Amino acid sequence: MKALHNAKLITLSILIALGLAACDKPGAAESAGKQIDKTTSEAGKKINETVDKVGNKMSDQSASAGEVIDDAAITTKAKAAILAEPGLKTLQISVDTINGVVTLSGSVASQQESDRAQALASAIAGVTAVENQLVTK
């Protein structure tokens, strides 16, 4: 029985000695720690790149949304200007705006009315061009 106890003590002592000796050598735990640090660093870089890309896309979309809002505002202002102009039959004139280009379509009684509608649309801030497709009846 004492021999068994002594064998257990010797085995335990050897295991402890091996464990302590392993602490001085770079082992699997240290390699795993370095790999985790490397992976974390790479993941951080990827996350930053993704955040930058998302930020750029959001800026682009915001700019596009701004253009749509600007186009809608231009259309509204053009319709209001035409409506306020005496002699223009506003129900017969359609106004559409895409990227600052106003398109007038429909019919008017004279070339003067067509020219006046075009001039009103051209005078609005943000208008880059006017496509006058008005037909004279």
Image: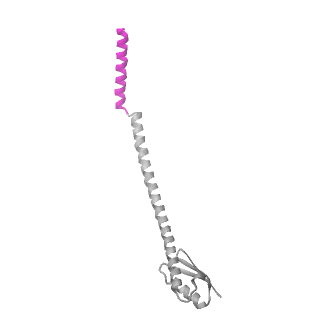
Vertical order, 46 against 6 (above or below) = below
Which residue appears farthest toward the top when viewing the image? Answer: 1
**Of 37 and 76, the residue lying toward us:** 76
The percent position of residue 30, horizontal first and vertical second, equals 39, 36
The percent position of residue 113, horizontal first and vertical second, equals 58, 89
Looking at the rendering, in which quadrant would you find the C terminus?
bottom right
The percent position of residue 72, horizontal first and vertical second, equals 51, 74
Magenta-colored span: 1-25
**Of 24 and 40, the residue lying toward us:** 40
Name which quarter of the figure residue 133 lies in. bottom right
Q: Is residue 60 magenta?
A: no
Looking at the rendering, in which quadrant would you find the N terminus?
top left
Q: What residue is drawn where x is 35% and y is 23%?
A: 16
Q: Is residue 2 magenta?
A: yes
Which residue appears farthest toward the right when viewing the image? Answer: 137
Vertical order, 98 against 12 (above or below) = below
Q: What residue is drawn where x is 39% and y is 39%?
A: 33
